[in-house]
Amino acid sequence: MKPLVSICIPTYNGAAYLGPCLDSALSQTTSDLEVLIVDDCSSDDSLDIAQRYARMDSRIRVSLNTVNLGLVENWNRCAQLAQGEWVKFLFQDDLVVPDCLARLLAAAAEFGVPIVSCARDFLFEPGTAVDQRTSYRDHKAHIENLYRDSPHWSAEQSSAGALRWIGHNMFGEPTAVLLHRSVFARFGFFNPHLYSTCDLEYWVRVASNTGTAHIPDSLATFRVHPSAMSAHYLQTPLGRYRIKTLDPLLIVHDYAFHPLYTRLRATAAQSRPRIDLEDVFWKRALSALWFARRGSSHRTDWDASLLAEWQSISQHYPRLASIPFRERVLAKWRALKKTFLLRTDRGKAAIQ
């Protein structure tokens, strides 16, 4: 018989925190579950720990990837292997309280939505920068404020929120979210071209079509530490460019053009003032290309790989490859406009 919930734990070199993570998963008051651990070719003791727990509890199932898939593709592998009616991601660093699943399932049933989130606390490990701690706390307060009036958002409200805060996560990390497995058949999987906002984009992709619900109580704990992948990305110019520039650009691209965002675009068209997502995309794209070119200059404080990254991602997003052509068209248009205005001024001067 299929379990009600699959707790999916994608692992990669997570031995330091995997034990407490598994303990929290197995302590759920909802017992009709499987704990699916998908190891992405770890070089530490992650797989050994997972197999040891599996020998102690039959609800644990361990899968080892034959090659390293990378973070996002391993999330997708988890979703593909999950057998439960509901899918609950739990990261190797994180924890959930015993009634986390029970309350998320109850909220999903109450509001009839396939995606539910909850508030989360943070566990800051030594070495976590002060500004990073502040950023996470501010984000938590922001989410609490969003759902202050109602714990349930319709598809239109979810779309409006996503448009108001493009690139900002209104739900939280995967550890704080529960999904019905049907969403993967309806809306596809996580976008592997996004570095750090693939969860945000997916939550919006689903909620803008179905609506969502949020539990204001902290039912999960997100561990923040200097060795986390998100912290690693921000340590290099290329990582910062991907997270702060390219990721938001690709999200706007999908908002503007992807067929699964039709309802979101309808909300944008009906908003006052009207939001022109295509115009937002092209402006951001021009800015992102300029930044990549500037980053690829010979200045010592910039990384020459930025432009190469732009070119690489453009292979998957043809509209980005057309940006240089658009630049040439705009330059010719500006030159013609300047010539026309100059001739007009000369004509007025001759008449006078």
Image (cartoon, helix red, strand yellow):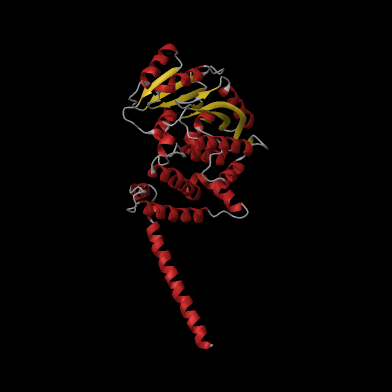
Instruction: Say which of 96 and 290 sits in front.
Output: 290
Position of residue 97 measured from the top left corner of the image (x, y, whole percent)? 56, 21
| Quarter of image, res 294 | bottom left
Instruction: Say which of 112 and 133 sits in front.
Output: 133
Position of residue 7 measured from the top left corner of the image (x, y, whole percent)? 48, 24
Residue 341 lies, with reference to residue 190, above or below; the image says below
Position of residue 19 measured from the top left corner of the image (x, y, whole percent)? 44, 18
Instruction: Say which of 78 and 280 sits in front.
Output: 280
Q: Would residue 286 be found to the left or right of residue 69 on screen?
A: right
Q: Would residue 141 be found to the left or right of residue 94 on screen?
A: right
Position of residue 262 measured from the top left corner of the image (x, y, whole percent)? 53, 47
Q: Residue furthest top?
A: 56
Residue 207 lies, with reference to residue 38, above or below; the image says below
| Quarter of image, res 272 | bottom right
Q: Residue furthest bottom?
A: 351
Counting labels gives 0
Q: Residue furthest right?
A: 149
Specify the quadrant that holds the C terminus.
Answer: bottom right
Residue appearing at x 42%, y 29% in the figure = 80
Residue appearing at x 63%, y 35% in the figure = 152
Residue 59 lies, with reference to residue 85, above or below; the image says above
Residue appearing at x 33%, y 31% in the figure = 68
